Amino acid sequence: LAGPRIVATDKEVLVDAEKDHAGYDPPHRLQQLPSWLASEVARRAHRLVADAVAEEGVRRPHFTVLTALSEGGAASQMALGTRLAIDRSDLNAILNELEAAGLVERVRDETDRRRNLVRLTPGGVVALRRLDARIDGAQDALLTPLSATERRELVRLLKRVVEHHPV
Amino acid sequence: LAGPRIVATDKEVLVDAEKDHAGYDPPHRLQQLPSWLASEVARRAHRLVADAVAEEGVRRPHFTVLTALSEGGAASQMALGTRLAIDRSDLNAILNELEAAGLVERVRDETDRRRNLVRLTPGGVVALRRLDARIDGAQDALLTPLSATERRELVRLLKRVVEHHPV
DNA sequence: CGAATGTCAGGTCGACTGACATAG
DNA sequence: CCTATGTCAGTCAACCTGACATTC
């Protein structure tokens, strides 16, 4: 009997005896679909980012909210939600957790007593600084295969797509 | 009293009386984060694609599986799962639905009776053709703001990132 | 009064984990 | 005996819907 035949592919050398469990190898059709590629990249990005922020005890949307507060200052929950396209309901849960962790505080807006003004605490500022470092590390890990120019180009193109689709 | 002051921004003209509910306006920090941009694009893509395939009565992963079967021929569930990086458990549920809809069929692999060989039915082939058209429409909607060259470049960059991160 | 805000309950979808029976 | 495969139950995060009390 002839031994298992070795066949060369573009990515690796594999055994062809039974072409089973050949590993991750998505259909070419999908590999050319922007929507599929975006989802796959987002999947990788999510894993990296989630792991990164988990080391500070929060999840991804918490980082998003902290960043918005840091950049835009105190805001009502409604304003925060529309700025970030996060649902009122989810945002409320996120703020509960951030408040319990002492990273933000809610104070009643006396000019409109329906509203809570949400703002960073000093602890929140410190936590965000640590988060920022970890987030930057995750970006690097995600974009390893791209040159600096390619990274800028990717960001430019993605930003255009995001800006074109309101909410 | 002076009337509400009009102030010009880079995207629109808005009233500054109360700078509340100014609409979707994510922090600049996030707008430069590749991971955040990828997630936002994936969010848009998911909405468009989910709506598109829903008109044929399926969800996104169903399309993925049908495509893999069409391109790679019949395969065991395990092989399908690893090729697409879909969990065995989830894939099983997807196949149950596809089989109930008559788009795929499972036959016992007699050379290894632990395995099911999954293959497209004629109905599945037809359904996939209709899905393909809708999917292409969704890509167009997603990439409206980009030129043909930019679309190719975006696909190239995303593909590189995906290929670099195994599973 | 109607509209906006925050809050709560619940529901779906996708990603993932662990257990288990059957077959290799 | 140990592993691989398919199946089932259940968790979790993100996203979304609807209802409700308070305040404007």
Image (cartoon, coloured by chain):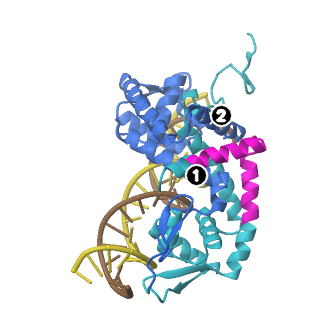
Chain colours: A cyan, B blue, C yellow, D brown
Q: Nearer the viewer, residue B96 or B37?
A: B37
Q: Chain of mark 2?
A: B
Q: Secondary structure at mark 2?
A: helix
What residue is disc 2 on? B156
Q: Residue furthest top?
A: A1
Q: Nearer the viewer, residue B105 or B149?
A: B149
Q: Secondary structure at mark 1?
A: helix
Can the viewer see residue B68 in this picture? yes
Q: Is residue A57 above or below residue A147?
A: below
Residue at the image point whose x is 43% and y is 78% from the top: B3
Residue at the image point whose x is 67% and y is 57% from the top: A49
Quarter of image, res B121: top left
Q: Is residue B103 above or below residue A96?
A: above
N-term mark: 1 or 2: 1
Residue at the image point whose x is 53% and y is 26% from the top: B75
Residue D7 percent across, percent down from the top left: 46, 42
Can the viewer see residue B109 in this picture? no
Residue B50 placement, left or right of B160: left
Residue type at mark 1: give it: Ser
Range covered by the magenta-colored residues: A132-160
Residue A14: numbered disc: none
Residue type at mark 2: give it: Arg
Residue B39 percent across, percent down from the top left: 58, 52
